[in-house]
Amino acid sequence: MKLESHFNLDYTLSCGQVFRWGKANGWWYGIVDGSILKVRQEGDELHFSAYPEDVEDEFIKSYFRLDDDLTNILRIINKDATINKAIQQFNGLRIVRQSVWDCLISYVCATNASIAIIESMLRNLSEMFGDEIVVNGKAFFSFPKVKKLAKASVNKIKLCNVGYRARFLSEIAKQVENNPNLLEELRNSDYLKLRDELRSLPGVGPKVADCVSLFAFDKLEAFPIDVWIRRVIYQIKGAAIPRTKDGTEKPLTVSEYTELSSFARRHYGKFAGYAQEYLFYYIRSKDR
DNA sequence: CAGGTC
DNA sequence: CCTGG
């Protein structure tokens, strides 16, 4: 497929927004909605195939948000020196349009865990509760379906090394099982309403709700704040992070979260979520 | 400690 | 709080 506007597959899949993609022999392999996608970029050509069934160009365009006017978005969010550097360095990074269920479960797992551990948890869940898909003799496992997870006991879910998150996963699965439209109904809500609705689910606080709003509900104004983004925002504001007496950073409170994320929306505008992705990748690649 | 939440 | 790197 010929790319019509700028895009960088490596940045897009490496920046930390998706957990079920890996690169091998120059190809990216990902598990998306029960299919195995194989993708490779060569300049302005995007090569891809899918198993067990092929996918249309339209699916790829939608998944990688190739329909977003990235030039315009980057122009709008380019409001300070830090984001300017991030944009220079990672130009072509796009937000991935994830499916709601996978995204929700993934980010509930992502609380208080490092990326390597999140990936391991999702792999374990998929191997235990997903369907096996064999491609070229290699086994992949699709994401667990709602029904499968709803029927599983908390103890069995815990075998996936998800720790205390097991009861959240179980409870969310049961709620969705009892009300299959629960999540899709929210699509018509505006961002703030959606955020509140998502927060009513167990294990979903402001950070997870913003991630799901941004990655699965097209709410590009959502601005998820974690410890890294928090540091950048204070840096941009020219203010110091609140610290305790012993010098460590104070935990982020809900009111501080609300204040910082509304600052980010005032500062970056309606595409603040794009700013967040660029900043997150930039600060992570710089500070480690 | 780690991309928070109850 | 769970738990692996």
Image (cartoon, coloured by chain):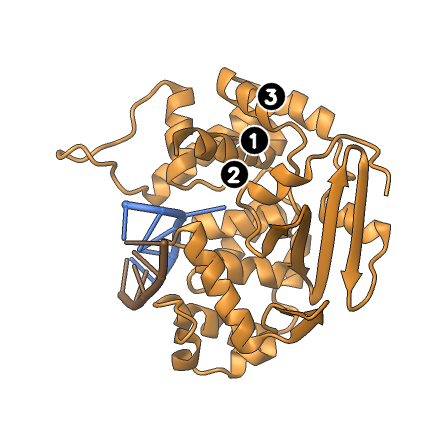
Chain colours: A orange, B blue, C brown
Q: Quadrant of residue B6?
A: bottom left
Amino acid carrying mark 1 in the image? Ala
Marks 3 and 1, Cα distance to the nearest angstrom? 12 Å
Q: Is residue A86 visible?
A: yes
**Residue A238: horizontal and vertical position, in percent?**
36, 18
Residue A68 located left or right of residue A237? right
- Ranked by sequence position, the earlier of labels 1 and 2 is 2
Q: Which residue is mark 1?
A: A275
Of tags 2 and 3, which is closer to the observer? 3
Q: Which residue is mark 3?
A: A88
Q: Which residue is mark 2?
A: A223
Q: Residue at x 64, y 51 (%)?
A: A217
Residue A30 located left or right of residue A196? right
Q: Is residue A178 visible?
A: no
Indicate the secondary structure of the residue bearing disc 3. helix
Quadrant containing the C terminus of chain A in the rendered view: top left
Marks 1 and 2, Cα distance to the nearest angstrom? 8 Å
Q: Residue at x 29, y 24 (%)?
A: A240
Q: Residue at x 68, y 28 (%)?
A: A73
Chain letter for mark 1, please: A
- Ranked by sequence position, the earlier of labels 2 and 3 is 3
Q: Residues within 10 Å of mark 1 (few under 14, many from 20)?
A: many
